[in-house]
Image (cartoon, helix red, strand yellow):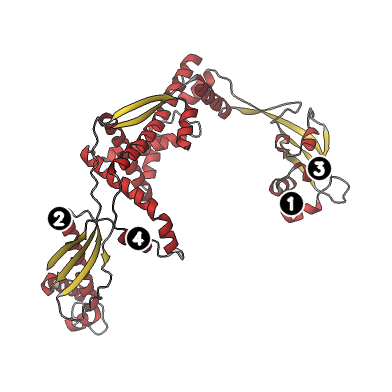
């Protein structure tokens, strides 16, 4: 076998591989012998089928498989041993003729290779990158406490309607024979769009009968159809007035800020008293906002590195061919590639820079690192539902289930790498530290 790699320029290469009969003959013969042992051909006992028949039946496909295998193995071996920074997969060389394996060897294969541009980004204490610390003030703590009291709140019965109350009652269509009648129809006047119709419910008491027009009250056909329990197509038949006799008034009352709330959020006696509770809330917020600060730092580090890398030359033609192959099912593939190519190259640039930084800092990821990311993801998902004291056993089980999904694992690996990279780079570069409010931070992120 002969392999030749010719760099046509700094980012394009042509690899030529010439395969001799001896490179794959032994493999072909072994495979055909295995086929003969297992072949079930009428008229022959197992293992006694003539080799000439096996050759006619399977020879060409086995031969092609063996050739493709040896070409692939040698190609990637060459790339690895010669440190060719290949982007993506090798592509058959445009213009080269298809190999005819029915002819005698040698066979010559040519591949176009996209080569990564040289990126020399090295960072030190002379590199300054912004780092934003978000101030955890009373406003943020109050908002979090408000969220906890809302989640722990419940509906209570009331005698007189107030804004945001939920009503149940008997709904009856007027001036129409066999009109609609619905028991325990739910109405929340707060969401009625018409001010005049909403006003009819002001100060209403349990047992009162309200005469109103649902069609005027609700702009949305979906809302009206749900209330009247009819298809949207039938709404035009029910545009008149209805009576609504209130049978129940329910008022949502937030939970009190007391020990019962503290125990519900953090566990029995984990915190005692409002002062300790607010301090714990502040710690939680700070930990959450630290993740936001770190993520922003990584974005700013990326911008700094991309600027430092400067304008790079890419094997555009080859990379576009790869994009077209990866999206060949699209009917607008050419337009899609032209529209998305620049963004794809931008992401590829950061990917290569990040690989350099990870290698320079000797960052390694273990199974435990990936599991920890999965656990923290599980913890965050539970926290969205106000469950802050989930036992470790449940977190571990939930994380294990997520790790069974292969499409999730790579995301956890990438996240684990990012976390280690952030911590390393905060020690390498000079941090231009700034303390800002959450509103100011959000404005930065929006920009």
Dot 1 corresponds to which residue? 230
**Nearer mark to the viewer, of 1 and 4:** 4
| Res 251 → quadrant | top right
**Nearer mark to the viewer, of 2 and 1:** 2
Dot 3 corresponds to which residue? 213
x and y, in percent, of residue 384 in the image = 49, 34
Which residue corresponds to the image point at 22% horizontal and 59% vertical from the top-left?
A: 9
Of label 1 and label 3, which has the lower sequence position? 3
Q: Secondary structure at mark 3?
A: loop
Dot 2 corresponds to which residue? 82
**Crowd tier of the residue under label 3, counting other residues whose Cα lies within 10 Å: few below 14, some 14–19, many 20 or above:** some
Q: Secondary structure at mark 1?
A: loop
| Res 427 → quadrant | top left
Q: Is residue 397 left or right of residue 91?
A: right
Of label 4 and label 3, which has the lower sequence position? 3
Of label 2 and label 1, which has the lower sequence position? 2
Q: Is residue 96 left or right of residue 186?
A: left
**Nearer mark to the viewer, of 3 and 2:** 2
Tell me how far mark 2 sits from mark 1, CA to CA. Answer: 72 Å
Tell me how far mark 2 sits from mark 4, CA to CA. Answer: 25 Å
Dot 4 corresponds to which residue? 320
Task: From this view, report whether residue 322 is shown above or below residue 35.
Answer: above
């Amino acid at each position: 076998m002969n392999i030749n790699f010719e760099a046509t320029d700094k980012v394009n290469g042509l690899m030529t591989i010439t395969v001799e009969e001896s490179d794959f003959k032994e493999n072909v013969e072994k495979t055909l012998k295995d086929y003969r042992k297992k072949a079930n051909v009428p008229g022959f006992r197992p293992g006694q089928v003539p080799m000439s028949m096996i050759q006619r039946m399977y020879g060409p496909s086995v031969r092609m498989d063996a050739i493709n295998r040896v070409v692939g193995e040698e190609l990637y071996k060459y790339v690895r041993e010669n440190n060719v920074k290949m982007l993506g997969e090798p592509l058959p060389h445009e213009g080269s003729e298809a190999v005819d394996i029915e002819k005698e060897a040698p066979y010559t294969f040519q591949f176009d290779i996209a080569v990564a541009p040289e990126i020399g980004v090295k960072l030190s204490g002379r590199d300054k990158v912004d780092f934003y610390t978000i101030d955890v003030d009373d406003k943020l703590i109050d908002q979090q406490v408000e969220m906890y009291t809302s989640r722990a709140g419940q509906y209570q019965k009331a005698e007189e309607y107030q804004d945001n109350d939920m009503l149940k009652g008997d709904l009856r269509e007027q001036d129409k024979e066999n009109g609609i009648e619905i028991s325990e129809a739910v109405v929340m006047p707060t969401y009625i769009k018409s001010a005049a119709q909403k006003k009819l419910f002001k100060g209403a008491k349990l047992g009162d009968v309200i005469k109103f027009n649902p069609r005027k009250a609700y702009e949305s056909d979906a809302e009206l159809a749900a209330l009247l329990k009819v298809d949207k197509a039938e709404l035009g038949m029910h545009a008149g007035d209805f009576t609504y006799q209130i049978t129940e008034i329910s008022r949502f009352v937030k939970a009190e800020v007391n020990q019962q709330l503290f125990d519900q959020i953090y566990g029995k006696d984990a915190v005692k008293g409002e002062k300790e509770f607010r301090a714990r809330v502040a710690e939680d917020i700070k930990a959450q906002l630290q993740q936001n600060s770190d993520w922003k730092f990584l974005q700013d580090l990326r911008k700094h590195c991309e600027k430092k890398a400067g304008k790079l030359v890419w094997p555009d033609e080859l990379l576009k061919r790869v994009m077209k192959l990866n999206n060949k099912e699209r009917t607008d593939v050419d337009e899609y590639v032209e529209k998305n190519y620049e963004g794809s190259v931008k992401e590829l640039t950061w990917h290569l820079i990040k690989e350099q930084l990870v290698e320079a800092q000797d960052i390694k990821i273990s199974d435990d690192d990936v599991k920890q990311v999965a656990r923290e993801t599980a913890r965050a998902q539970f926290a969205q539902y106000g469950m802050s004291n989930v036992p470790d056993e449940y977190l571990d089980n939930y994380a294990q289930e997520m790790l069974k999904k292969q499409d999730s694992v790579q995301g956890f690996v990438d996240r684990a790498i990012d976390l280690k990279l952030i911590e390393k780079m905060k020690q390498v570069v000079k941090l231009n530290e700034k303390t800002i409010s959450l509103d100011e931070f959000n404005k930065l992120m929006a920009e």
